[in-house]
Amino acid sequence: MTTSAPTRTPASALVDVRQITPRERHPLIFSTFRALSAGQAMELVNDHDPRPLFYQFQAELPGGFSWDYLETGPDTWRVRITRVSSAQASGGCCGGCGCN
């Protein structure tokens, strides 16, 4: 996990879950993430530290994502979650082939 300056790229989706029923948040976040192509990112906006979600991502998609805090509370938390290519996740990508 890293903390970065707030930036958004055209290839990112914004998912603000602050007004969404808690039981509906994780399914929405995962469905949005799964719709991303490798190298694309989503920006998650939450009202608390989404660290439990990070652990769920680790369990379900080990090596398949990167997680960058953009804002760390106390009222608003923003995280950029980027989909990593399967070659990168398995360590099989040298970075020069353009697969990411």
Image (cartoon, rainbow, N blue to C red):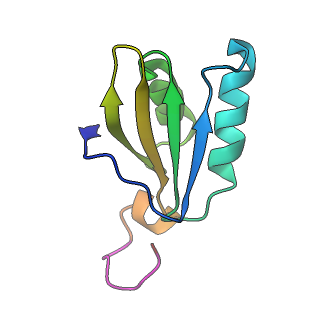
Dividing the image into 4 quarters, which one contains the N terminus?
top left
Residue closest to the eye, 60 or 28: 28
Dividing the image into 4 quarters, which one contains the C terminus?
bottom left
Q: Position of residue 47 (x, y in %)?
A: 49, 17
User: Residue at left 43%, top 55%?
Assistant: 8
Q: Position of residue 84 (x, y in %)?
A: 47, 58
Q: How many marks?
A: 0
User: Residue at left 43%, top 44%?
Assistant: 80
In the figure, 95 relative to 57: above or below? below
Q: Main secondary structure of the magenta part?
A: loop
Res 16 quadrant in image? top right
Residue closest to the eye, 37 or 18: 18
Confirm whether the magenta stretch covers residue 42.
no
Confirm whether the magenta stretch covers residue 98.
yes
User: Residue at left 41%, top 64%?
Assistant: 88
Residue closest to the eye, 53 or 85: 53
Res 49 quadrant in image? top left
Q: Which residues are magenta?
A: 93-99
In the figure, 14 relative to 92: above or below? above
Q: Position of residue 25 (x, y in %)?
A: 68, 24
